[in-house]
Image: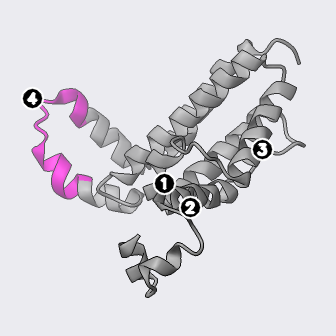
Amino acid sequence: MRRLAGALDAGAMSLYHYVANKEELLDAMIDVVFDEIELPSEQADWQSAMRQRSVSAREVLARHPWAIGLMESRTAPGPANLRHREAVTACLRKAGFSVVMATHANWLLDCYVYGFALQEASLPFDDADEFADMAEDVYLPQLSADEFPYLTESATVLFANNYDPAQEFTFGLDLVLVALEPLRVSD
């Protein structure tokens, strides 16, 4: 609380006028993050709606990497958090998932999004150009075609085709959504 007060150029005690403690502050901060995530569209089919919601969550977590480990840790969810969870559950239930399968689908999607966001936040590059530069300067010189033939082949093909690691998110997300489809009980 003291560090936050210092960053805000305010007294630590003045923060307690707004929040009772650090936990209440974290609850409010996570609620703001949930508020930034696009809710699943009621007009789209469930896969499109959950895909867009997952892409939105990834984009929000890229802006707020500090939140990744806290998204599911709050015991006093705020209104945006609850609206978000209601909209996701409604989307899945209306798509024909049972209560249990909707819960499984929600957990699976969130685990995928949070895990990808966590991995992405720790990468030593920010975009495809930086990745290509790093690979060319650091990674490729370490590869011997005799010792690492498959890595050398992969690097050669991927970089020749302007590989962008950011595309891995939608590739994996689409696989998850396709795998969930047969688990619906009705249309």
Furthest residue in direction bottom, as rendered: 9
* Residue assigned mark 3: 40
Instruction: Please state which amino acid type lies under the numbered disc 3.
Output: Pro
- Mark 1 vs mark 3: give the one in front: 1
- Give residue 29's mark: 2
Instruction: Please state which amino acid type lies under the numbered disc 1.
Output: Ala
The residue lying at 62 percent from left, 47 percent from top is 55
Marks 3 and 4, how far apart at CA = 48 Å
Horizontal side of residue 88 vs 66, given as left or right? right
**Magenta residues: mostly which secondary structure?**
helix
- Which badge, 1 or 3, comes first in the chain's sequence? 3
**Between 123 and 160, the one nearer to me in the picture:** 123
Q: Residues within 10 Å of mark 2 (few under 14, many from 20)?
A: some
Magenta part of the protein: which range?
135-152
Residue 110 in the image: state x and y as whole percent.
57, 36
Q: Quadrant of residue 50?
A: top right
Q: Is residue 42 visible?
A: yes
Q: Residues within 10 Å of mark 4 (few under 14, many from 20)?
A: few
The residue lying at 79 percent from left, 41 percent from top is 87
Residue 7 in the image: state x and y as whole percent.
41, 81
Instruction: Please state which amino acid type lies under the numbered disc 4.
Output: Glu
Circle 1/circle 2 CB separation < 8 Å: yes
- Mark 1 vs mark 2: give the one in front: 2
* Residue assigned mark 1: 67
Helix, strand or loop at disc 2?
helix
**Between 31 and 161, the one nearer to me in the picture:** 31
Marks 2 and 3, how far apart at CA = 21 Å
Residue 146 in the image: state x and y as whole percent.
9, 29
Helix, strand or loop at disc 3?
loop
Helix, strand or loop at disc 4?
loop
Helix, strand or loop at disc 1?
helix
